Amino acid sequence: MRLILVALLAGGLIAVSPEMPAFAQPAASTAGYYASWFWLGGDVQAPRSYTKASLGQLPSTKLDVYFNTGAGPVNASYTGVLLWDLLNISRVVVDPSIKNDILRKEVVVTGSDGYQAVFGLGEIAPQFGGEQIIVAYAQDGVPFNASSGFAKLIVPGDKTGGRAVSMIVRVRVVSVK
Ligand SMILES: Nc1nc2c(c(=O)[nH]1)N[C@H]1C(S)=C(S)[C@@H](COP(=O)(O)O)O[C@H]1N2
Ligand SMILES: [Mo]
């Protein structure tokens, strides 16, 4: 019995570790917490994590957006880094033997409360959709308050804020099966 348990645990660890090292996976809770860093990994060659300081060092993009939320409309200017740039830095793994393999990938963005939104890489890749989705770190020039975490996704053109994942802890590239 104990042997089986150990084998199951080991199997689980082996299955999980290449994609998501334990140190890089903050626990998701329903309440959410201020996240001071997020991890970017999955089907990329160079997974890494970002803090406000390291994100702030990358070339920034400013987006003026308008969207509705449960608490009323938001009309603001957000500063952040293009999601595509972050994916490029970590180099998405593509199989050259599969035609336009990038179109079979998606990115899952997760908040510290477990809230998630998924985007197809075809929507973001400049040679296809070229959507200017950013991982924002400031609103109208001011860093987010504690309830937003340091990083929040901004999806230009969205009618409501549902995909504006806040308190980002994880950005993970996955391939369709
Ligand atoms: N992590 C996380 N992000 C989230 C949500 C959430 O529940 N958790 N709600 C979304 C919804 S439904 C909306 S409308 C907006 C609200 O944006 P605001 O925080 O700027 O009001 O946040 C989005 N981002
Ligand atoms: Mo919402």
Image (tube, grey):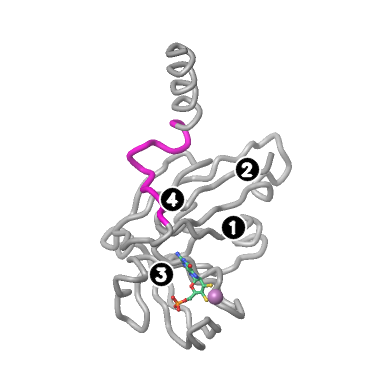
Image coordinates of residue 137 in percent, x first then y, are: 35, 70
Image coordinates of residue 26 in percent, x first then y, are: 36, 48
Tell whether label 4 touches label 3 (CB within 8 Å): no
* 4 or 1: tag closer to the N-terminus: 4
**Residue 136, disc:** 3
Residue occupied by mark 2:
175
Q: Is mark 4 within 8 Å of ligand 1?
A: no
* 3 or 4: tag closer to the N-terminus: 4
Amino acid type of the residue tagged 3 in the rendering: Ala
**Up/down of 8 relative to 19, above or below:** above
Amino acid type of the residue tagged 1 in the rendering: Val
**Residue 25, disc:** none
Q: Residues within 10 Å of mark 1 (few under 14, many from 20)?
A: some
Q: Which residues are magenta?
A: 17-29
**Of helix, strand and loop, which one carries label 1?**
strand
Residue occupied by mark 1:
118
Secondary structure mostly taken by the magenta-highlighted segment of the chain: loop
Left or right placement of residue 52 versus residue 168 in this view:
left
